């Protein structure tokens, strides 16, 4: 194997691959990246046995071949090389090492046999459809903040992608919740997705595929079964196991009787929450919200730092005032996800969950559980 590749292109692909690989593994080959030449360039393959990534990048191939080397080490070496260089890679047949040359730098890197690298087989994936990149980004970005990270409820550690509705009224939904907050994002159902099973895409998979979406335009093809999913991009394919579990009936957590409507400027609200939360350093980080007389009063206090109060003008038609407490971080996360100039907060009382959405955004809704104040 012998090839020349642009350092920046190589670094970007290595950054994707090394984040798939686990730093600590009892199987040495799983810490390696498989480099394989093709007719048009170089393919980099990495896996942790749950997620597998194959990325194709252009390269000048002088001699075809394949080799595996430590993904993290190779990434660190290329990352530390000066910008603007070309990187020469060659396989030494005598000792099986990879020789890397760039500028005045030269490295000889140990390898493991290529045949030890796991075969990245998928099995049958009967469902296939395409999503616009912008749609998939929205389904991920506006829901991922609500994913849980608790091991005890592993089935909440991801995004629940499923079809909602029946007949001609079907929509595609992404849902995430950690039992304290919930995000529900909708999109027009694409052709081929009408009969997909409800699937839970794990946190790491969500993170890795989202990185890849930033660098492409157009569409991404999704192929899936009840146990696996594959994202096919123009120059990369990421496949993953799905979380094996039943997602809870999240619709029971969406309030339907909240009759007290608050309309306010979304950006001003998010900024005010952020300012007041600065002093909420206690473990629970409670921020109080008092609503009445077309005003929201936000307040927070801690024994260490003091207190903060800020008033925001709102539209509030009810004669009944409401005082409710929220986790400051959770409230700010939702406030920052409102994709509209104006936000709508629907309340019932001080002990019931709030329903939050953009005034002109019918495709997203957020639920936040209250805290005792």
Image (tube, rainbow, N blue to C red):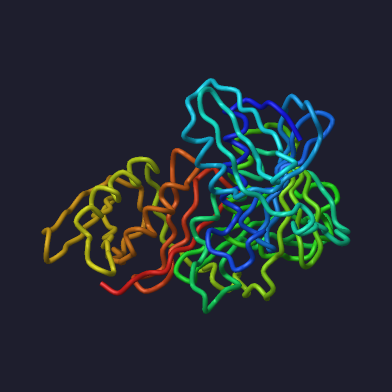
The residue lying toward the viewer, choosing from 31 and 310, is: 31
- Quadrant in which the C terminus is drawn: bottom left
**Is residue 346 visible to us here?**
yes
Q: Quadrant of the N terminus?
A: top right
Extreme residue toward the front, this view: 94
Q: Position of residue 226 (x, y in %)?
A: 79, 67
Residue found 49% across the figure and 52% down from its top: 357
Q: Nearer the viewer, residue 179 or 55?
A: 55
Name which residue lies at 47% across and 48% down: 337
Q: Is residue 217 left or right of residue 168?
A: left
Q: Is residue 24 left or right of residue 280?
A: right
Relative image position of residue 178 (x, y in whole percent): 50, 68
Towards the viewer: 358 or 232: 232
Q: Residue at x 46, y 56 (%)?
A: 356
Quarter location, residue 283: bottom left
Residue 132 drawn above or below residue 113: above
């Amino acid at each position: 194997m012998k090839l020349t590749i642009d350092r920046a292109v190589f670094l970007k692909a290595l950054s994707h691959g090394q984040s798939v690989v686990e730093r600590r593994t009892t199987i040495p080959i799983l810490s390696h990246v498989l480099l394989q030449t093709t007719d048009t360039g170089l393919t980099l393959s990495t896996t942790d046995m749950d997620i597998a990534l194959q990325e194709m990048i252009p390269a000048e191939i002088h001699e075809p071949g394949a080799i595996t080397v430590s993904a993290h080490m190779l990434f660190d070496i290329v990352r530390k090389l000066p910008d603007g260089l070309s990187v020469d890679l060659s396989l030494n047949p005598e000792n099986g090492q990879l020789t890397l040359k760039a500028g005045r730098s030269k490295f000889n890197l140990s390898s493991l046999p290529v045949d030890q690298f796991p075969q990245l087989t998928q099995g049958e994936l009967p469902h296939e459809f395409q999503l616009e990149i912008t749609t998939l980004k929205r389904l991920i970005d506006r829901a991922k903040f609500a994913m849980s990270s608790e091991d005890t409820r592993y089935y909440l550690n991801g995004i629940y992608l499923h079809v909602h509705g029946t007949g001609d009224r079907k929509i595609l939904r992404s849902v995430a919740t950690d039992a304290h907050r919930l995000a529900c994002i909708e999109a027009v159902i694409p052709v081929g997705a009408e009969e997909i099973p409800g699937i839970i895409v794990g946190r790491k998979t969500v993170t890795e595929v989202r990185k890849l979406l930033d660098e492409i335009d157009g569409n991404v093809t999704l192929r899936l079964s009840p146990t696996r999913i594959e994202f096919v991009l123009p120059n990369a394919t990421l496949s993953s196991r799905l979380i094996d579990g039943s997602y809870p009936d999240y619709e029971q957590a969406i309030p339907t009787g909240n009759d007290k409507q608050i309309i306010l400027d979304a950006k001003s609200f998010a900024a005010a929450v952020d300012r007041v939360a600065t002093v909420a350093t206690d473990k629970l980080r409670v921020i109080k919200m008092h609503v009445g007389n077309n005003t929201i009063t936000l307040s927070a206090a801690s024994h260490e730092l003091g207190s903060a109060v800020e008033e925001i003008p709102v539209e509030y038609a009810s004669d009944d005032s409401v005082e409710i407490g929220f986790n400051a971080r959770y409230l700010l996360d939702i406030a920052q996800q409102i994709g509209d100039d104006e936000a709508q907060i629907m309340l019932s009382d001080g002990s019931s969950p709030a329903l939050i959405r953009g005034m002109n955004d019918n495709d997203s809704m957020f639920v936040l559980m209250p805290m005792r104040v």
